[in-house]
Amino acid sequence: MTNIEKKQVTVRTQKIRKSHIRQKLIFFLVLAWLLILAAVFSDRLCPYDPNAQNLASAMQPPGPSHLMGTDTYGRDMLSRVISGARASIFSTFILVAVISVFGTAVGVLCGYFGGIVDSLMMRISDICLAFPGLVFAMAVAAVLGGGIQNAVIALAVISWPKYSRIARSQTLALKNVPYIHAAILAGDSAGQLMIRHILPNMLGPVLVTAMLDIGTMMMELAGLSFLGLGAQIPTAEWGSMMSTGRSMLQTYPWVVLSPGIAIFLSVVIFNLLGDTVRDYLDPKNSHFGRA
Amino acid sequence: EDKKTFVFGDTTFNAENEEADVNPQNTYAGWACIRYGIGETLFKYSDDMEIEPWIAKEYENLDDCTWKITLNDGVVFSNGRACDGEAVKESLEDLIAHHERAAGDLCIDSIEADGNTITIKTTEPKPALINYLCDPYGCIIDVEAGITDDGIVIGTGPFVATELVTDDHLELVKNENYWNGDVNVDEVTVRTISDGDTLAFALQAGEVNAAYGMAYASYPLFENEDFTFTSTPTSRAFYAWMNFESPVTSDPAVRQAIAMGIDKDSFVSVLLNGYGYPAVGAFPDTFSFGGQNLTTESYDPEGAKQVLEDAGWVDTDGDGIREKDGQDLVIRWLTYPSRQELPLLAESAQATLKEIGMDVQVNCTSDNNTIRKDPTLWDVYASAMVTAPTGDPQYFFTSCALDSSVSNNGHYHSDRLEELAAEMEKEFDTDKRSDLGIEMQQTVLDDHAYVFCSHLKMSMIMQSNVTGLVAHPCDYYELTADLDIN
Amino acid sequence: MNHYVLKRIIQLIPILFAITFLSYGMMRIAGSDVVTQKMENTGTVVSDEVLNAAREQLGLDKPFLTQYAVWLGKLLRGDMGNSYVSGKPVFATFISKLPATLLLTAVSIVMTIIISVPLGVLAAVKQNRMTDYVIRFFSFIGNSLPNFFVSLILMYVLAIRLRWFPVIAKDVSLKSVAMPAITLAIAMSAKYLRQVRATVLDELSKDYVAGARARGIRFSVTLWRSVMKASLVTIITLLMLSVGNLLGGTAIVESIFMWDGVGKMAVDAISMRDYPIIQAYVMWMAIIYVAVNLLTDLSYRFLDPRIRLGGDEV
Amino acid sequence: MSIILEAEHLTKIFRKKGSAPLKAVDDISFQLKAGETLGIVGESGSGKSTLAKLLTRLTDPTSGTLKYEGKDITMLKGNGLRELYGNMQMVFQDPVSSFDPRRTLGDGIGESLRNRGMKKEEIQKRVEEVLEQAGLDPRFAARYPHEVSGGQCQRAAIARALAVEPKILICDEATSALDVTIQKQIMELLQELKEQHGLSFIFICHNLALVQMFCDRVLVLYEGRIVESGTPDEIIQSPGEVYTKKLIESVFE
Amino acid sequence: MCEEILRYDSVEVSFGEKVVVSDVSFSLRQGEILGLVGESGSGKSTLIKAAMGLLGTNGMVTKGDILYKEQNILDISEKEKRRIRGAQIGMIFQDAGASLCPIRTIGEQIYESMRAHRKISKSEAKNHAMELFEKLHFKDGKRVWDSYPFELSGGMNQRAGIAIAMLMNPPILFADEPTSALDVTVQRQVINEMLHLRELFGTSIIIVTHDLGVVKAMADTVLVLKDGKKVEYGKAEAVLNDPQDAYTQKLLSAVPVLRRSVNT
Ligand SMILES: Nc1ncnc2c1ncn2[C@@H]1O[C@H](COP(=O)(O)OP(=O)(O)OP(=O)(O)O)[C@@H](O)[C@H]1O
Ligand SMILES: Nc1ncnc2c1ncn2[C@@H]1O[C@H](COP(=O)(O)OP(=O)(O)OP(=O)(O)O)[C@@H](O)[C@H]1O
Ligand SMILES: [Mg+2]
Ligand SMILES: [Mg+2]
């Protein structure tokens, strides 16, 4: 039986897609970094002073001297879009950072300790979730007044429960994983356990959610700007630039499209980054060493 | 037979503007009552703001406190009831009983009706009584017919309100009994459209026949033969109040520099697309006591720099902002967003004042009314106010520039102004009042207590087949019997 | 079953209580009140005595908790007070505007489902192929356009250029609801189709899909009969979670399209600081949201036999 | 021989909303003598793992007491518990998931030492020592769990358990996730430890052959209860209970 | 033995660029039971998935042929493959519970599988199933039919899985570790049932396992895999009693044996 004749065998050429997850990850990370760098160094990158008005050259269409045209005040749109990166990206970053850190901390603590505090916090997060997002933010902003900080605070108040939910369910799941038991047997205290083992191992889902949230939060900030509860003049912030420029959609479209494109690009970059991180962390895509 | 239906889109007919309905007894809702042709007042203003007869034919000032008013014959309410002296008396008495401002403005002691004449006695001399009667709250309504829960009243105007949903729409039909000519349009819908862009789209799509209150940036869309504009200057002024308690703006040089550092002409021609008038004083040139009689600083950045330099405000640390005694020249500019011109003004002033070395920090908030009560929180307050709602100069000063003015939050005080105001209080002669008005304006201008930037050019835009819709300087005569669609 | 429903409803009581407290408290922290608010933009000059008298009349001078207790007591009797601005009963106003918003919400949810479920499933099935990339790209566009901007584009294209729909809603009809609903659906679908995709992908990677394949069952049959049914619970949960967002989103869209619903009412009320209206709005929206979620939970019991038959949830 | 671990009437009841309470461990009493190897067998779901978690205090019993060297440890918390873990350690069924995927094996092995305040160099030395004891090259300390094979990982897990020089080692199906060839190697390692260090073992397994080979005494668990106990040979040669018989009959040869 | 119905010819399988199975050839005759043994990751599952076309998007048979009744089943259309799957080659999964949709009843899924291959009414399908359940000594067939997978024990699920695979009466059955997810006590039943099947229908079976006891109990031939390569292939007794390859020897010596005097 062992001596089956070696005969001609069919050879099939591979048409298998390679998944370039790592390369993709690096690519989007670089793009995200560029965006952040642009936000940090926006002052130096602007061809003109973003707040310098020149009413004589208002409403100029895109051209060689103003690549994205000028707005009602004759300010250079390109410069405003670049300097808007700071307000837009930083405020969304801070917002997302605050809610993800706070929400995660609450979720981990609740998931780990359970009990009354857990039920209480979860009820509170239920309540926060129950309030219609933007309207609650509007009301908070109405209470605190306009301004981008207050808009950020308002959104933070209603947005953290998402993270605490994720963190809590992750913690509950992790609590039953053998390595956590092993760590308990190694004599880890609750704090050590949470910081050394639980937090690092749920970073993935939290990070992915945070990446995707950057786009969402940019939209919500834009919504608040539309209601007059966003950035203050003359701060260039993409959402409020779109909102103030919206009347010019038909007459001077570049005024509203320029920040729109900026929002689009950054949302796309962070969404794709989030997706890629998700793929990267997916155990099914075994790119960690041994298969 | 085709019915003529007219749809009017308006951004200002809403509760936020205190026009929740069309009941003249309800705060400012009388504006809607008169604007949309439901009610009429005894007298009205002509295009140059002179008093003209309307429901009333003439008046006689019997003595300081007694006025005799004769009504036109044949005036009827839309329900057919005759609008005689008795009806007017009831309407005014009801008004005084219910309206928050009317009683104080009119100081009516008693009204007597006799056929088509009424005699009004006031508790104190009221030189501007007839002007006050022209205020939209003075719309004569049929009190017997009452006011519906929705705030609908029966007036004498060319249109009759049939349905009203606050902040949404008002349905009107032609008043078949109109006393003052034929009404051309059968049905009118007034749509409240709070978003200016939506309004612009609606006009473009032909869903509204005429529009009031869209964004200036949308105007170019309609500057073609398919649409007609009707515009007129009004006494709504956009101006900045100086805070005399503030360490910065209490300095006359700073105030003067601000006055010289705001580019009113460019503001109007570029940011308002030309739909406005650079202002000199509180009142537009159409008034006899208007800006044509006054002098003040014009835009002069170099001059402003010099003024500041001379007063000791110098930029020593090279950051572009001047300082004096270690204090930066920071101007906290308080304003609010509900008038689209104000943020534009703030942002443009911010830039032009920066050039002369001032750091303007804008606080544009709908909470402005609270903030301005506390003089430590602001330096300049920019607002949009109708300075002469009654066509008379006194109102502006009594409401904001005198020691007794409730709104004088910047605590401006001028001995001269107080004197002139006292004089005005007693003056019945229109010409003399006008002269006093001019002098008082010049006084505040010389003190740089206010910087008047521009006057509103009220504009309505309509499809080119609409006729008879004409903007009026006092902002509240809009729909009339003349309105027609061809 | 009835027992379960009852239990769930009883559990809601503290949440509802907290909602009322927050709705009330939040508005009262505000710096300025309606009385001063009334002066805005009109240039009226009112003396402090008049202001204080007005405040007294509205009960704004009493301590906070007293005001809350009074308010709650009235609330339980179905009286939510009168609008500071219009003076009309809040509850009646709210109820009269609610149907419009519910219609808008319902239509946009239906649209969202129609757009995002098929696309999400398609993207999952064609994972990492061109179709998937194209669908995801469109979802990015949807995700990066602010609501107000989408509204303008739709008005321009659908109303001005194509003249399919009216710019402003004249009545509560399907034709009028189309544009605001599409606006809401665009943003919702963009987010939602990604979630559908993820859920379906997750489900597709389960063993039973391979099992069905090994039994020679057509993939489409497995997809629709098993995968979709199994994903439904997750999909519905996610959809219901986004109802909160949607209800918030209606505010802007309603005021742009002049859709006379509670969202527009809320935007107007917020700009006028009309507390009773804002309170009613925030509170009722929260209650509606909670109720919708309760219904969702209950509906699972019909969708998922594991829950219905009391099997253990892992 | 002295009794090192004693369980008295240990019971664990899981209550779940909507279903009857489940007695996962039902009134279990036994004694473990120093140096003894106690096997626990039973089908899936019979409560073996739950018992292991009770013994290691990873879950709290519903009732019953647990004594270590005569001391009641049923309610031990905090530092007391940490001290106990110096004497009692456990090896888990799935070796790879018993290490934190984000930390090196050396890190995991040294964790208990670090928690005991040992210095860095000492830890490193001890880690290398136990790795060698478990038959692994010391360089494995720098590897991540996914970078080593299942068998190697289980060796590292044993090394981790040994690091604190415990007196009792609880193995919850420590070999059933592994291939037979590797299983054999691990069993040899455990045998060696037993002989050289005099450790006491609780050996949870469902493979009767392994239990027979390795254990001094066996408990047969069924639905949370001990249905039979004795030496492996006694039980295998003449099972007293129907269930035990079934268990033995199912073995293929 | 009867005719050969399945043949693997120098099969090489790759995932991405990684070759996982290389140059494996063997054949299966009617009624034969082939035991596929080897350590974890040696490519056992891959080998049978290759024939079923279940290698996923990144897996592919890069060399060789798999012939079912002289037809090369690698290069046929998806539609034809679908006809073979289930009807010609059945498959039992390691965890049959997981291979069934959790939210549909066993009955629905049985009916669906049968429908995929021929026109049949629900009641006919049910009758068929009941018949088979009876033959397989299922106690409560009706209950199983109406149950959801989660309502059945692991053993019952596994037997239901076997029943579904058998209902189409395929000449070949692949069983990928059909017992390792089960309790020792249930294992025996499942194995007995599979043997029973062969008796009833003459089914050929490939059973993947790492339990040599199972192989001893049921296989006619044994194929030993290591690192994707064939190390030994031959008659079961021959391989198990007299292993030629060092690896097979090691494997056999590692199996713990229960010592007992009386065999029952
Ligand atoms: N945290 C828990 N909550 C509820 N029930 C549980 C929990 N842990 C275990 N059980 C139940 O307790 C019983 C005993 O489970 P246990 O894990 O101890 O069994 P086992 O003998 O270890 O089985 P296996 O051999 O499969 O590991 C099972 O019915 C299980 O479902
Ligand atoms: N979809 C896949 N993508 C990449 N590699 C895979 C995939 N499936 C299996 N492999 C690899 O192919 C090799 C053989 O896997 P296979 O599942 O056939 O092993 P096995 O012998 O069945 O092992 P076990 O006994 O653990 O089931 C392994 O190294 C595995 O990592
Ligand atoms: Mg277990
Ligand atoms: Mg396998």
Image (cartoon, rainbow, N blue to C red):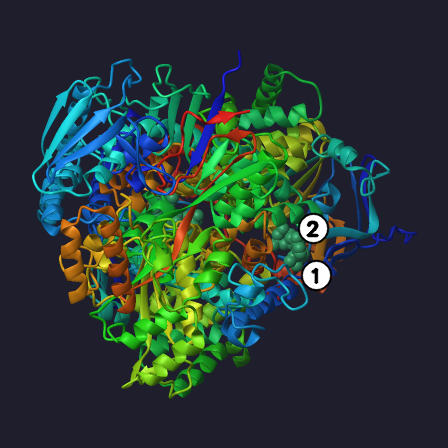
Residue D1 vertical position relative to residue B152 in the rendered view, above or below? below
Image quadrant occupied by the C terminus of chain B:
top right
Near-viewer residue (D135 or C141): C141
Near-viewer residue (B112 or E247): B112
Residue B57 vertical position relative to residue B242 in the rendered view, above or below? above
Q: Which label belongs to residue E1?
A: none
- Look at the numbered disc 1 and give the secondary structure of its residue: loop
Q: Is mark 1 within 8 Å of ligand 2?
A: no
Left or right position of D40 against C209: left
User: What residue sits right under mark 1 in the picture?
Assistant: E227
Outermost residue, right direction? A8
Query: Residue at (79%, 33%) from the top-left corner?
Result: E80
Query: Residue at (19%, 29%) from the top-left corner?
Result: B69
Q: Give the distance between the C-alpha atoms of the residues marked 1 and 2, in whole angstroms.
A: 12 Å
Near-viewer residue (E90 or C214): C214
Query: Residue at (29%, 45%) from the top-left corner?
Result: B391
Left or right position of B322 against B3: left
Left or right position of B136 against B125: right
Can residue D124 be seen at all in this image of the molecule? yes
Who comes first in sequence, dot 1 or dot 2?
2
Instruction: Report the amino acid beneath label 1.
Output: Asp
Residue D54 vertical position relative to residue C294 in the rendered view, above or below? below
Between disc 1 and disc 2, the foreground one is 2
Image-quadrant location for residue B130: top left
Residue C173 vertical position relative to residue B454 in the rendered view, above or below? above
User: What residue sits right under mark 2 in the picture?
Assistant: E46
Near-viewer residue (E172 or D192): E172
Q: Position of residue B147 (x, y in %)?
A: 22, 23
